Image: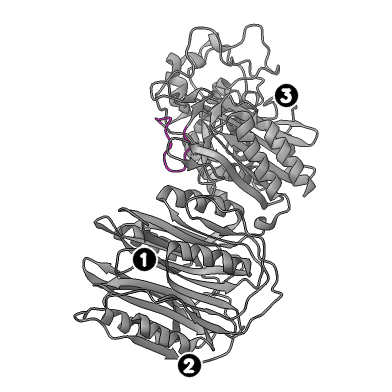
Amino acid sequence: MLQHLVIALAAAAAAQSVEPAEQETVRKQEAATAVQSAQSAAQPAQRQIQRQITRQPAPTRQVVRRITQTDSFHDPKSVSWYFRYGLSSNAYKNAWDTYKGRGQVPIDIETDRIGSNTRYSGVWQKNEDNRGWVSYRNLTSDGFHEKWAEYRDKGYRPIDQDTAMVNGAVRYSLIMVQNKEGLKWISNRNLTSAQFSEKFNQYKGEYMPIDVDAVNVNGSMRYSIIWVENKSNTGWVELRDMTPNTYGEKFKQYSDQGYRVADLDCYANTSGQLRYAAIWEKNKPGRGWAARREMSATGLRNWWKKYADQGMRVIDIEICPRKSGSGVRYAAVWRENDKRFDWSGRAAAEQALSDYVTNASAPGVAAAIIRNGEVLFRGGAGDADSEKSIRAHAGTIYRLASVSKAVAGTLAYDMEEAGIIDLDDRTDTLISGLGTQHVHTVRQLLRNESCVEHYTSDGNNDNGTQVTYQTAQNALDNHMGGAMKANSWIISGCSTGQWNYSTHGYTLAGAALEAEGGASFANLLRTRISDPFNLDTLRVEFRTSPDSSGERAKIYTNSGPVSDSGFQNTSWKAGGGGMEASALDLARFGDAVLRNRYFPQGTRDTMWTGSQNGRANGWSFSGGQATKGGDQQGSDSHIRIDTNTGVTVVVLTNVNPPGVETSTLSNQLRGIANAN
């Protein structure tokens, strides 16, 4: 049976274009201009086989008294959040503990069988009003009722309940939160279709549903639903037992009328066919939202990252049976969560990234724009790994190449500001074993004024190594047989103070920082640059394969993927070209430098002195812009900071050489930011 209720209808609004494979998404909805009276209609009944179920729990109904207040917890405008899916029981427990420790409250829990394994998924949001909450899973019916009654009596209300068949037994999950709003509420479970319709008609006038769930229990469908008092008279629609085609039709119908999907469930009916249940709410705030279904695990990941970049959070996750065949597919619902979703330059920036992938013949690209601490834009286009169909996004981790020099220079000035090192000390007083012609200071190394050679034609294969060096000192001692320490690595006829660009000079500078800092270069970078601002991806690259892993992008040449045998390990030049980061974290680093978060402006301005490439202590500074670009195997990168407008732009790609340099795109994005 298909049931629905429509409280209010609105004029049609434009919907975002629909992706293939039965995906749906909606952007903004306009204000309502028409209202219909409440109605309840039934679709033609679907045939169901009702069998006697042994020890089937009786239908459960609960009602709680009313107080007064409004419910902002249900749909906060902006909140920090986390999302995990397809976890083992232990992995879910670890995630639950972690997010609890971060002040998060679970708002959605999903239990499913994937193959022969039970898997858990969940969504968490920040517990901003410090309300009490509890969540349980793997409960028997009696166990569910015990916890439900205990916390009902303590003034809690349910926000999510899930029913699943686990090893032939019915098991329940439950999330309850302190009822600070004082809302009347009702929750039902284990309802037959007829009982569901009866309760639906009973409560539809005063209440609105916030959670619906269906499961096939030994050949009979059972339904659960949570109702809350509809104080604001929000229009809503609830439908269940929809075929995929019917859901698609209703999705378009109600989204065109100004509704958003607030809750979604997918399940196999008694005939093993895919069915959907959904709750739509009138999108009164006019905020953006999206809903997608029949996604692969990789597809879910791609859309999760894309919508997070745009400024939306996951509010509901479902693991569904496939329309045909074995295996599972995923469905999810998103809600606008950040004002960058409405940034006037977003469409132009997204188009610029898409055009870059085409024009540069790049697998993928990622970018981030920050203005005076506010993330205006983050996004990606193309692929982080084309072979695995993993899309690029602002959190994809790329090689930084020579942009590493700007980060290393900042680290050095941070250490000098803290009194850890005097950058005007001669390097040979800090590092032993240097040739007598190494008369440079650490600052001259950073400013590319040290007379240390760059890449040479001396027969050394500087980059042709797969050796991992844990410290700069170890690289200095051993890479190319210690050649960088020798007099032969000093440019003949050069006087210190002359500009000569040198990646190798940064390995010497890194060893000097280690000597004075009492830690490896990687640890100094982490503790002094990355950790203070939670820049988890900004780090020395310790990598032994060109393939993608986690959020790391696969690396490519312009003729295809880099091979394992051709892979170049960059740890020998950690300070000069051996770091990695996401576009978002690198942009946040740049913004922190711009806004004097590492050291005072006077120190920053001293560091940013020099217009030639890398002369401003790893940066270049000209016309009010601090910039640095880089390219190496599998990377072209650029950071641009406009001190006149407070805009920081980062662009990273995973190919070298691209058909268009990333500096061109970073300048284009700067123009978009300054115009919006």
Q: What whole-number distance in Å separates the C-alpha atoms at marks 3 and 1?
A: 62 Å
**Numbered label tally:** 3
Where disc 2 sits, the SS reads: loop
Q: Which residue range is magenta in the image?
A: 544-554
Name the residue located 39 percent from the left edge and 59 percent from the top edge.
Answer: 95
Q: What whole-number distance in Å separates the C-alpha atoms at marks 1 and 2?
A: 33 Å
Q: Is residue 466 above or below residue 257?
A: above
Residue at the far left in the pictured view: 54
* Residue 267: numbered disc: 1
Q: Earlier in the sequence, mark 3 or mark 2?
A: 2
Q: How is the image coloured?
A: one colour
Q: To which residue does mark 3 refer?
A: 612
Name the residue located 47 percent from the left edge and 51 percent from the top edge.
Answer: 21
Q: To which residue does mark 2 refer?
A: 65
**Residue type highlighted by circle 2:** Arg
Query: For residue 91, which quarter of the picture?
Result: bottom left
Mark closer to the observer (1, 2): 1
Where disc 3 sits, the SS reads: loop
